[in-house]
Image (tube, coloured by chain):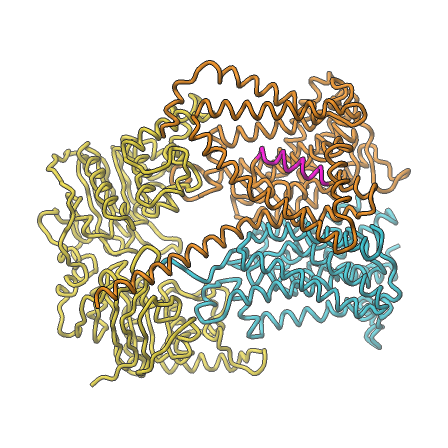
Chain colours: A cyan, B yellow, C orange
Amino acid sequence: MFDYDFLVNLLSAMVRNATPIAIAAMGAVVCERSGIVNIAMEGIMTVGAFTAAIVAGATGNPWIGLLAAIVFGGIFSMLHAFATVNLHLNHVVSGAVLNVLALGITAYLMIIIVGHPGTTDSIPVSLSAYRWAIPVLSSIPLVGQMLFNQTPIVYFGFIMIPLFTWFLNRTKVGLHVRAAGEHPLALETIGVSVYKMRYLGVLVSGLVGGMAGAYLSIEGNVSFTEGMTGGRGFIAMAAMISGGWHPVGAFVAALFFGLADALQVRFQVFQVLNVPEELFIVLPYVLTVVAVAGLVRRSRPPKAVGTDFMIERTQD
Amino acid sequence: MAQPILETRHIVKQFPKVLANDDINITLNKGEILCLLGENGAGKSTLMNVLYGLYKPTAGEIFIDGKTVEFSSPRDAIDRGLGMVHQHFMLVDTLTVTENIILGSEPGKGPQIDYKAAWKQVKELSDRHGLRIDPDAKIMNLSVGLQQRVEILKALYRQAKILILDEPTAVLTPQEVEEFFTVVRALRDNGVSIIIITHKLEEVKAISDRVYILRGGKVEGERTTADVSKEDLANLMVGRSVVLSVEKKDHPVKPNPVFQIEDLRVTDDRHIPVVDGLTLDVHPGEIVGIAGVDGNGQSELAEAIMGLRPVASGVLNHEGDDIKNLTTKERIHRKVSYVPSDRHRYGLVLPFTVAENIAIGYHDRAPNASAHGWRLEYGAMASRAEQLITDFDIRTPGPLAPAGNLSGGNQQKVILARELTREPSLLVVNQPTRGLDVGAIEYIHSQILAMRDQDVGVLLISLELEEIFGLADRILVMYEGRIVKEFKTGETDEREVGLYMTGGKKEQSA
Amino acid sequence: MSASKNTQSTGMLPRLLSPAIVLLGAAGTVLWLGATMSGGETFYFWGIWLIAAAGALYLWRYRMLNGPAEFKDHLHRAGRTMAVPIMGVTLAIIIGGVIMLLTGYDPFEAYGAMFFGGLVRNWHISVLNAAPLIFTALSVAFAFKAGLFNIGAEGQYYLGAMAATWLSLRIAMLALVTIPLVFVFAGLLGAIWMIIPAFLKVRTGAHEVITTMMLAHTARYLSPIFIRANGGDPADSTHPYVTDKILESSILPRLQEFLPNANYRVHTGILIAIVVALLIHYILYHTSWGFEIRAVGENKDAARAQGISVGKNIFRALLIAGFLAGLAGFNQVNGLDHRLYENLQAGYGWNGISVALLAAGNPIGVVFTGLLWGMLDAGGQFMARTTSTPSAIVEIVKGTILFLVVARYIYTAIGNIRRRRQRERAAREQIAEDARQEA
């Protein structure tokens, strides 16, 4: 049972399961580093998944679907930015409301466009058709299949790790984003707009959140089903926290969540150990609690995350 | 003749309730160190924020190099060669020294930061000005003195020709102050023009070439430092006639103190000692006034007395017992009353009604609650509140109006009504009249005096010397966490007290 | 001030009125909630009349006790607090209607069906929906009052449901004994599930939003294990698992037992929910515990300065919130399902957040917003069945209502900015005026 093929399959499944979580988590990292708590990731992913399936179905081209998902995820996230930055709404409240709104909008548009609730029609070509085994690399034993024989969005997820790390740690704007989440006034006093940086942070999470949603509907699947995000937006939050608000950490944490998911499916099928498979799903959540409890050292949120920032100070 | 680099003409800044700057004209010459001396609320910080583009002036003009400029954001000010070191540092703790310095003006082509170049520039800059620093250190691992150095480098990195330092020595140790002075002089010699905002006479004398004295939002005078004595400066800064009209009767003081503090030490949130070996006593029937400039440990002292801040060492003796380890609740029930300085933050729960705000603290006792303290008796609360509304002349629609709807003076009266009617044996009052109008001030003063006349021991902390002189029987001057001088009210004047307050003269009392 | 002078001079009448109001209100509520449209129409309208009568009597009594001036003030205050939610709901319904128009549906037909379905025809479903929502929303609202956000009510709800099932499968005693026991046990487990977030919040400052959310997911995924251990058999049904049916003695009485015309599914859970809401209102506004919790929620620093322990009250508030969410599980298991389904018609915990937000954390308000939410769901389903309009429009209306109501801060923010502008303009004019006079 635990033979070589099993292991290879398990690892590939781990990466596939982890991809939407990891992408969303890395977006959430940028968002929270800019100082905005984004529990609307779930809603953003729903919007992305839905848009991707509809557009890919209508055009017959999954790439256009992916693009649409990214754009609409971004647009939807702007609601969150507007509510939290300009209206100074509590970040958690705004996120909770947007999650409700996302469910409603997609379910309604589904009927309008598709004509029935539940599941959209299958798209003609899914992104998984563009699976690409990188020559030579994909034949590396064990990890070759996992890392180098994957579908497009999985690769995008890989690319995002160095990209986001570079963005946050090496670029000018990245530095500003980090400062906005740590000490917004310090940023404002040297003449960089905190509002803009926070809008940017939310926008990034919206764009990649849309992509994460697209993975679910047009790469891991061929249609959109209501409720298909299945709490992955929240799991992404958990991955972000466990990963210490860092893209690499978030990805690793997401991999762990993906592994737990892959294992629980296999344990359910094979009944190998006398352990309830659900314990594997639960483990990441429990570890997240342990992480925020301060037992893991580096898991410290950005100092000013979740705080409101008003530019105009009226009193001395 | 010196060449002016920065000039303000008729700067006015009106806040909703206060006129913070009233027709300010100052001139900064190239390559000089200029001090702006003034008490709290004199308008110094407002002026600097106007200069730095954080506030828009209500009226007036700013000139740099003879040309009029208008700043709509700090960015504009920075571009014109202004640099500012805020009293509360604007540094991002988790970033490195280099990152903080280059923030907003990063070197490098395209989107990427050229960290190597940045490192080099920072190193070079710090070498040139003799400001030694490790460019790779994280801010959170640096001492306050070094953090200030980073702030200065941050300004210099942006090619500041004019450097504004807001209360630069407030957070430094004496050794760090010495080093800081050296740095500032070196900067001047390198051609930087410097404005230092301060309320410390010593500092003015030690470092500045010229000094403007601000009072009540206006320029009170301009002096060349070498030609002016500390006494004159103190006079200009705080000197004014007492206009208080509250009548103070002689009242015998009881011989046995109700409250004694021995060698009290308290640290602030960053573990820096702020009350540093303070000793005092308060007798029933007297008002002990603590005079001092803001930030010398007065609020921490009050909080330590009330159990809101841990005591590092020392004794708080209330009626024979050390109350140091009691909870706030226990202290309140021992009849220690407290009027905090920030009434919105510590004094009142604004959305609560007047009646609830009067009951809070004793809310689980009869008559506010049933005998076992579980059920609240709103009827009793309201009728008691109504009584106090009459007694203290609180202008409110009724006992059930939210405290947040009342004016500042009436809010303060609610706090007084609560605290004074608990028959305290010790009353700690911190800046009771901050931001209030004359009528309310008079009323509150008369109430505090009435407490004294009922043999309550009153500890009055105030930044207003007028208030201290009008009310206190004894004046203790607090400076850098210690009592540096004790006076009998009749035997001194504001000038002398002001000199001790600002560190112009020191004498450790027993 | 003159009004409250009358407080002392209360006659006999108001005192006699109180029990009358309570009786009328209670009777009306039971009749109304228990009515069905299969022979219970008269009850339905009688119920509404009785409630209206109780309301009128209450107002009359208030006027007698406090005088006409204070009465007017009271009405004004009530009007102001109600204005934003009512405006939000109205506006959202209009927006929903416009969306329907634009997408080719008839909003009048759709709304007609929705309100008829939710308020009349399928009223019993609205009531069934509302009961668990009221419990979870009370939980969220209670935490709100302490300035905390219990976003994981769903988890405590699951724990409560598991606890209720476990005990209800095991103790066979008199219903009178069993039911209170299960009630308390379900609440306790909900509270125990909250100990970790509460402890972490007080000790390390770990944010309750994250900890409760993670524990909510944990609880949800633990439930299948529990269900398999209590009769859920993977062999004959994979998903969703179901436990055995709970013992007869632990089933909540149905309304039918004393209202013959009530729908057979409607149980006393809704009445318990309302009583608990009143109790929570009492705790919050009439006890020293509630006083301290609210003080901590509104201003930690001032509360601390008056000797109120912040940590103790946060702990207390979160545990009570956990207890309340646990009761929602009790309601579902012992009232409606009589067994634990794996998915429990999940989401009552999450939806409770919306219901609590909408009521601005007011426990009495939660009863109404809970009924509104339950009504919208039931009505939406009815609408989808009888007209061609998708029920999802209800979700959009719900989301819009929420946004417009929580964005009440929009209104205050706009007000603040306008006031500040006015003040600044006045100040500038004053200065100009001064300058003119000096010149």
Q: Nearer the viewer, residue C17 or B92?
A: C17
In the rendered view, tell whether residue B301 sits above or below residue B41: above
**In the image, what residue occupies the spot 25% across and 73% down?**
B26
In the displayed structure, does residue A76 sit left or right of residue B103? right
Q: Residue at x 61, y 23 (%)?
A: C25
Residue B235 percent location from the top left of the image: 14, 61
Q: Residue at x 81, y 61 (%)?
A: A53
The x, y position of residue B189, in whole percent, is 28, 82
Of B454 and B76, the residue lying toward us: B76
Q: Please identify the residue farthest to the right as the structure is shown.
A: C236
Q: Is residue B422 visible?
A: yes
**In the shown orientation, is residue C150 left or right of residue B394?**
right
Name the residue rendered at 77%, 67% in the picture.
A66
The quarter of the displayed image where residue B18 is located: bottom left
Q: Which residues are magenta?
A: C363-376
Q: Residue furthest bottom?
A: B1
Q: Which image quadrant is residue C305 in?
A: top left
Q: Main secondary structure of the magenta part?
A: helix
| Residue B330 rendering spot, x and y as whole percentages | 36, 33
Horizontal and vertical percent position of residue C137: 63, 38
